[in-house]
Amino acid sequence: MKKIGTVLSLVLLALALVVSPVLAKSSWNANSVWPPKNHHSIGLNDFADKVKKATNGDLEIVVHTGGALGYKGPELLKTVRDGLVPISDMLISGVAGDEKLFQIVTLPFLVRDFQELRTLLEICRPYFDKAAEKKWKQKILYIAPWPGAGLWTKKKITTLEEMKGLKTRTYDKNGALVMDAVGATPHALPFSEVYTSLQTGLIDSVMTSTPTAVDAKFWEVLQYYQPLNITIATDMVTVNLNSFNKLPKDQQNALLKIGKEMENAMWDNVPKIDKDQEAISNKNGIVTVAPDKKLIADLEKITENIRQDWLKTAPPEGKKIYSDFMKKVKR
């Protein structure tokens, strides 16, 4: 009987180990291509800390910033879909080449400020969620903005005419189309080459946001900043659907709940980050030139073809989003 009791005890111990919370612990690598001090990297680390705390350490997310995992950005929809990394942030315009629906948030001069961008994304979100899950086998946890893309120049720009002849570094297709439309010459340069290209005169202006300008110390080679909000870029953080579905329900709920919290927090913070970074630029000598209504109206008019060309080949969901947004903002 003693032997049977010992065997039974061992069986019960084995069963206990099988269902033990220790074995339920998971550790995920999270990818970020941004530097450690970038607000999206900071946000992803905050997200990871909150998840660890909410799950009592049963789900640990280890954030790798600066592209340390080897992924550059444009391939990240496929990377997360294929489970090469379970969770990643990604620039939506960077992956929009693989998903045409996502291109709507990259259209120049579609949104005029952060509030309009948030309105657009509220309309987009159900369609984005469906595309991410059904087509790309991942779930969007949160979407957060960058500061808007302005024009950093050597000469002061106040009219459309003054943009003609600029030699401008742009970072995506639509930015290049905008500069073409105004009679400027776009240059697709790696950011590592921007500073020296400004020094040598290959370019005389840059389309980018305030944090990037501060990182690059534009005040050493440029004089003016025009906050045009040509586009306001967005990042999203997604999780591989298979990895998500394998989690216990309480951990799934924690990820979704914390994702909503992070989204709200980052939307609140980014306008302040934008102003803070602009103030640093101003303190170091950059002069902000606020665009007047006529310049913005002229830019919206001259870039209308870019938006309409996208609409011609947009998926039905994209056309509906566009229509609903324009009605919402009364344009």
Image (cartoon, helix red, strand yellow):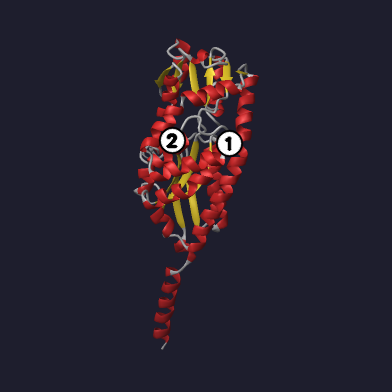
Binning the other alpha carbons within 10 Å of mark 2 as few (below 14), some (14 to 19) or many (20 upward) gives many
Q: Secondary structure at mark 2?
A: helix
Which residue shows up at 54% across the image and 58% down it?
Answer: 55
Identify the image quadrant of the C terminus: top right
Position of residue 74 in the picture relative to residue 54 (left or right): left
Give the residue displayed 41% in from the left and 35% down from the top: 94
| Label disc, if present, on residue 290 of the rendered structure | none
Residue 41 shows in the view: no
Image coords of residue 19 (percent x, y): 45, 69
Q: Residue at x 53, y 48 (%)?
A: 48
State which quarter of the image contains the N terminus: bottom left
Where in the figure is residue 51, as x and y percent of width and height?
A: 54, 53
**What residue type is disc 2 on?**
Ser
The residue drawn where x is 38% and y is 43% is: 315
The answer to which of 298 and 209 lies nearer the viewer is: 298
Instruction: Tell which of 174 and 193 is nearer to you.
Output: 174
Q: Nearer the viewer, residue 211 or 104?
A: 104
Amino acid identity at mark 1: Phe
Q: Earlier in the sequence, mark 2 or mark 1?
A: 2
Residues packed near mark 1 inside 10 Å, few (<14), some (14 to 19) or many (20 plus)? some
Could you tell me how far apart the alpha carbons at marks 2 and 1 are, in whole angstroms? Answer: 17 Å
- Examine the rendering and report whether any part of residue 328 can be seen: yes
Q: Which residue is mark 2?
A: 93
Q: Is residue 78 above or below residue 295?
A: below
Residue 114's tag is: 1
Foreground residue among 3 and 324: 324
Q: Position of residue 300 (x, y in %)?
A: 51, 26
Relative image position of residue 221 (x, y in whole percent)? 53, 14
Does residue 116 lie above or below 181 as drawn?
below
- Number of labelled discs? 2
Q: Secondary structure at mark 1?
A: helix
Asked if 23 appears above or below 231 in the picture, the reply is: below
